[in-house]
Amino acid sequence: MGVTDPAGPVMDRDEVDRALARLGAEHEAIETSLLALQDHAGRRLLEGAALTGTTRERWTSAEASITLLWAYFDAYTDALRSARDIRARRRWSSREDLVELTELLRGESVTVAGSATATANAPTLSGSARLSQSFSLATLVERMNELYASSLDMVVAADAVWSALPARIDLLAAELQRTRQLAHSVGVRPGEHPAGDDLERITRTLTALREQVVSDPLAHWLPAQGSSAPGGGRPDTTVYDREARALEDVRREIDAVLTVRQDAEQRLVRLRDVLSRADRTLAEARTARGEVLAKIAATEVPVVSGPPTVLQEQLATAAEYRRHAQWHRLSPLLESLEQRAEDELLRARESLTAVTAPLAVRAELRGRLDAYKAKIARHGLAEDPFLIERYDAARRMLWSAPCDLRVAEQAVLRYQHAAVELLGAPRVPGQGGPQDRRGEQ
């Protein structure tokens, strides 16, 4: 009759030798992995770090898993050594040896002391603490693989964060310090300029971020979705990236202030020139308005306002900022003043155009009158009494003061119509039918 037991059918010598070879290879691979984990830089850092938060909780669990891993490995090593010793008793193993080897290699023959599992408090164990637990070698390998994967995942994640973030934070902090010194040199200080307040906030945030990254690296780890490989994921750089962008914005602001410092005098000179031209244009408009009121009758002439004193006051303030090297205040003031000065010059020019419009109309009427007189002369009709009468009437109106533009325009049109009729050309459209010029007064 065949012998049966919980380990299944008795293994023959070839099966035993194959199993021992496979288990020996697994033992070597597990030992290599455990030694690599033991020497891992991340694990050594975790052992010596003052951890907090999630990292402290997970490291406590990982330490228990690593302790249990070694307990399992020692038991696995002892069992494998015993199996090898039995197989080495004789070249051709007896049936009793094969039965014993079958039980050792396939049965739950590996006993782990309860003190080891209780001390390790391994998360993979279930139920209440026992004096001891028995495993098959295959089950023990599965348990070790699970514990190794979870422990390595935690160690690799923490090491990845420590390798990535603190160095980057330190580089950004060094850049921040240089920016702070530059900002101070141009008067950008907390409480006086928004960029100075931003620098203070970035400093506080980076200091707190570095402290947290060092003590709780796993709080800044993003696991890869759907990945079961140990260490699958990446460091969470959200806060770092945000502060890096904020510092870049501050640097651009400081650069703008530096630019102001370099060309402030030239910009102030240009500002004075623009405002001076605006003042001269307004003065010319006021003079022209007096001339128009004196020379043109029955015309609405817009009032010309004086130069805005607020711009001159702000220009004086800008010059004061430059003298006291308050570049952070000068920068926005210059930008505002440059735009408002250009607007003021445009307003002055528009005012001059509006005021002198009646004079332009009078000049256009004079030009038209003389042009028709020259045309009549070319046709040999300059001595026509009727045209001379019409011309003299229009000329008196246009060269008299004050000049009524509406009446003068009608006089020019009458001269123009008479000239057109005399030359045999069609009447000017929209001006009515021809009249007997001898009957006109």
Image (cartoon, rainbow, N blue to C red):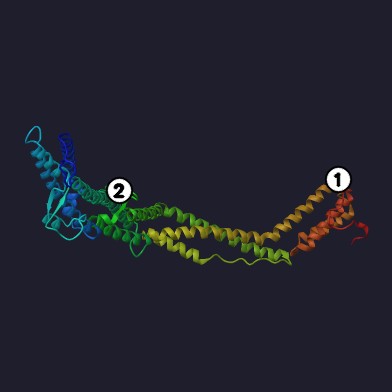
Which percent across, then down, holds residue 185? Answer: 32, 56
Residue 37 higher or lower than 312, as above or below: above
**Which quadrant, please, contains the N terminus?**
top left
Relative to 86, does residue 276 appear above or below in the rendering? below
Q: Where is residue 186 in the image (x, y as percent from the top left)?
A: 34, 57
Residues packed near mark 2 inside 10 Å, few (<14), some (14 to 19) or many (20 plus): few
Q: How far apart are marks 2 and 1 (CA)?
A: 106 Å
Q: Which amino acid does label 2 sit on?
A: Ser
Residue 385: which quarter of the image?
bottom right
* Residue in view at x 14 percent, y 46 percent: 73
Whether tag 2 and tag 1 are in contact, CB under 8 A, the answer is no
Q: Residue 228 carries which label?
A: 2
Task: Choose between 181 and 54: the one closer to the eye.
Answer: 54
Q: In the image, is 132 to the left or to the right of 243? A: left
Answer left or right for 174 relative to 353: left
Query: Residue 35 shows which numbered tag?
Result: none
Q: In which quarter of the image is the C terminus?
A: bottom right
Foreground of the two, 158 or 152: 152
Quadrant hosting residue 323: bottom left
Provide the secondary structure element on which disc 1 rests: loop
Q: Which of 188 and 286 is in front in this view?
A: 188
First in sequence, mark 2 or 1: give its number: 2
Crowdedness of circle 1 by 10 Å Cα count: few (<14), some, many (20+)?
few
Q: Mark 2 or mark 1: which is in front? A: 2
Residue lying at the far front of the rendered structure? 1
> Which amino acid type corresponds to the residue marked 1 in the rendered image?
His
Residue at 53% from the left image edge and 66% from the top image edge: 308
Q: Is residue 354 left or right of residue 153?
A: right
- Residue 379 disc label: 1
The quadrant where residue 92 appears: top left
